[in-house]
């Protein structure tokens, strides 16, 4: 069973991430501050766009972290084997290449490994979009990909 930590500010991200694990094969823990996840060996840490409390990041232990791009200090402080970033800048692992009223194109800018060991290759995924905030949409798509799911249910 995968151990997943979701560091958020009440965006409802943890509940949505818990629906993405295949066959309920994950224990998802939500928190508003990373200190509440300290001491746990996480397979995946999902950091929401609105997360705060960066000072607690070095206390975490995770295999893979999915976090907003542009946070170089957090990336350096976080003890993760793999970091997958999301955001508007093309240097992020996951970006939106287009966003329309009912569909979004998520670009995987560089390959990464999902929790099940499969490679997620560079590609563009056209997904249904329901108006969710773009960064929240990206983090959900990233979580789905990391959990070995096609991210059709993210939007």
Image: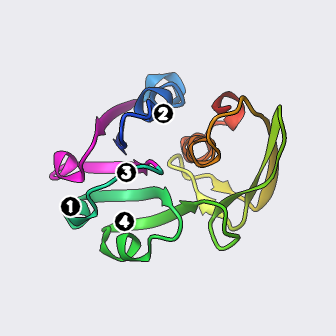
Q: Nearer the viewer, mark 1 or mark 2?
A: 1
Q: Along the line of sight, which residue is nearer the eye, 105 or 60?
A: 105
Q: Which residues are magenta?
A: 26-48
Q: Along the line of sight, which residue is nearer the eye, 95 or 60?
A: 95
Check disc 4 and report its element: helix, strand or loop. Answer: strand
Q: Quadrant of residue 8?
A: top left
Q: Nearer the viewer, mark 2 or mark 4?
A: 2
Residue identified by numbered label 1: 56
Q: CA distance from mark 1 to mark 2?
A: 22 Å
The mark found on residue 80 in the picture is 4
Q: Earlier in the sequence, mark 1 or mark 2?
A: 2
Q: Residue at x 83, y 34 (%)?
A: 101
Q: Position of residue 35 (x, y in %)?
A: 17, 52
Q: Residues within 10 Å of mark 3 (few under 14, many from 20)?
A: many
Residue identified by numbered label 2: 17
Q: Earlier in the sequence, mark 2 or mark 3?
A: 2
Q: CA distance from mark 2 to mark 3?
A: 16 Å
């Amino acid at each position: 069973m995968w151990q997943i930590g979701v560091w958020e500010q009440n965006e409802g991200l943890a509940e949505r991430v818990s629906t993405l694990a295949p066959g309920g094969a994950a224990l998802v823990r939500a928190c508003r501050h990373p200190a509440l996840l300290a001491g746990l060996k996480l397979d995946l840490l999902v950091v929401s766009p609105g997360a705060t409390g960066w000072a607690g990041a070095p206390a975490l232990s995770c295999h893979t972290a999915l976090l907003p791009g542009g946070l170089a200090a957090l990336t350096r402080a976080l003890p993760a084997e793999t970091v997958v970033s999301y955001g508007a800048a093309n240097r992020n692992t996951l970006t939106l290449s287009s966003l329309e009223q009912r569909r979004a194109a998520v670009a995987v800018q560089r390959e990464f490994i999902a929790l099940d060991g499969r490679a997620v290759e560079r590609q563009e995924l056209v997904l249904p979009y329901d108006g969710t905030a773009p960064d929240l949409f990206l983090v959900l798509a990233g979580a789905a990909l990391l959990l070995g799911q096609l991210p059709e249910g993210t939007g």
